[in-house]
């Protein structure tokens, strides 16, 4: 039976005192043996944490004691091994970085669409469906008919909109991302740019995969997640992908059979981009990571977190 509960959470809410919140939250997480990462900014909170079920629920209850986060929502999944190696609470300018200072989902945002209503919306031929995630995430799965902006970071999304979308032509825009945070912020940006009918998937792909039966699903492939599970599929079961910890690309089981794949060193996507010296450096790092794990320690170069 899976023993570690993972909670993915975020909320856009004005936190004027977010800097003062950092240390108390970190101390409560450490006290409950929680690991993962939480981001705090004036615009809200975002992150994923994991631990024993009773400890995760204790932290969620603690966060909800703040009236501003009383309705904080989260998504749950389970793992047999701990998906994180350490606990961090970071202060940021944005809880998801778009790089446009005056975008504020606390002031304006698109229309939330529940997972059970999503299929009907994206089946409308007048709707343009945008995947707001990065290209390597889209690579392993997306919704049927979705447009891939081919962005490498969320910062590139505003430029994609400026170069490719028109308020007079694209009357209905629907967007989605992993947990809902990027598409919610993207919807705020697009409303600001004058797009009138803007929709986003409430709870993101994860909530959709958890809620919508596979036989009714319009999702194709797996969903990349930013922890050791690498990807999940319907019912939030752990997927079949692993990850190249040299270039971060998600890999299929077939790609891991390639002669160019060496765990922690290279894969078919980065093999030709790495010098012999770089590969040797990565091999040494991987060796030290393995030795640290055998000692029950975390090596500074361990990126699998």
Image (cartoon, rainbow, N blue to C red):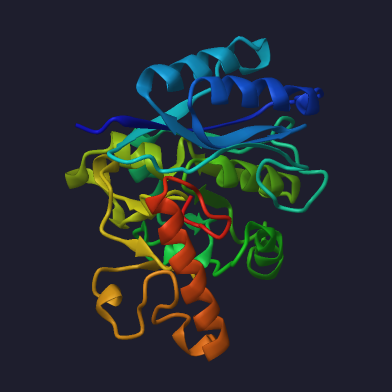
Asked if residue 290 shows in the view, the reply is yes
- Asked if residue 157 lies left or right of residue 205, the reply is right
Q: Position of residue 97 (x, y in %)?
A: 69, 50
Q: Is residue 58 above or below residue 133?
A: above
Quarter location, residue 142: bottom left
Q: Position of residue 8 (x, y in %)?
A: 47, 35
Q: Nearer the viewer, residue 286 or 199?
A: 286
Residue in the picture at 17% in, 46% down: 215
Q: Is residue 7 above or below residue 183?
A: above
- Asked if residue 140 lies left or right of residue 100, the reply is left
- Asked if residue 280 lies left or right of residue 217, the reply is right
Q: Disc count in the image?
A: 0
Asked if residue 198 shows in the view, the reply is no
Q: Is residue 159 above or below residue 95?
A: below
Residue in the picture at 57% in, 41% down: 181
Q: Position of residue 259 (x, y in %)?
A: 30, 86
Residue in the picture at 51% in, 40% down: 180
Q: Nearer the viewer, residue 224 or 168?
A: 224
- The quadrant the N terminus occupies is top left
């Amino acid at each position: 039976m899976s023993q570690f509960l993972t909670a993915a959470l975020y909320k856009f809410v004005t936190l004027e005192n977010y800097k003062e919140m950092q240390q108390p939250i970190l101390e409560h997480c450490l006290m409950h043996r929680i690991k993962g990462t939480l981001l705090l900014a004036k615009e809200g909170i975002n992150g994923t944490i994991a631990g024993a079920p009773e400890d995760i629920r204790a932290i969620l209850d603690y966060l909800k004691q703040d009236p501003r986060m009383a309705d904080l929502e989260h998504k749950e999944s389970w793992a047999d091994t701990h998906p994180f190696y350490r606990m961090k609470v970071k202060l940021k300018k944005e809880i998801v970085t778009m790089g446009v200072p005056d975008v504020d989902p606390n002031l304006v945002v698109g229309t939330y669409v529940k997972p059970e209503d999503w299929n009907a919306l994206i089946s409308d031929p007048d709707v343009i469906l945008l995947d707001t995630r990065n290209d390597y995430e889209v690579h392993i799965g997306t919704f049927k008919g979705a447009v891939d902006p081919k962005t490498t970071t969320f910062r590139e999304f505003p430029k994609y909109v400026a170069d490719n979308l028109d308020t007079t032509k694209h009357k209905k825009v629907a967007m989605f991302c992993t947990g809902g945070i990027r598409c919610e912020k993207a919807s705020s940006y697009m409303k600001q740019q004058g797009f009138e009918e803007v929709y986003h998937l409430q709870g993101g792909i994860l909530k959709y995969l958890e809620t919508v039966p596979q036989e009714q699903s319009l999702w194709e492939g797996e969903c990349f997640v930013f922890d050791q599970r690498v990807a999940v599929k319907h019912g939030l079961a752990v997927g079949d992908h692993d990850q190249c910890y040299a270039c971060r690309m998600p890999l299929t089981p077939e790609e891991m059979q390639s002669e160019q794949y060496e765990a922690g060193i290279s894969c078919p996507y980065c093999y030709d981009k790495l010098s012999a010296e770089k590969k040797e450096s990565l091999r040494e790092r991987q060796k030290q990571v393995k030795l640290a794990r055998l000692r029950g320690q975390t090596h500074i170069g361990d990126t699998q977190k």
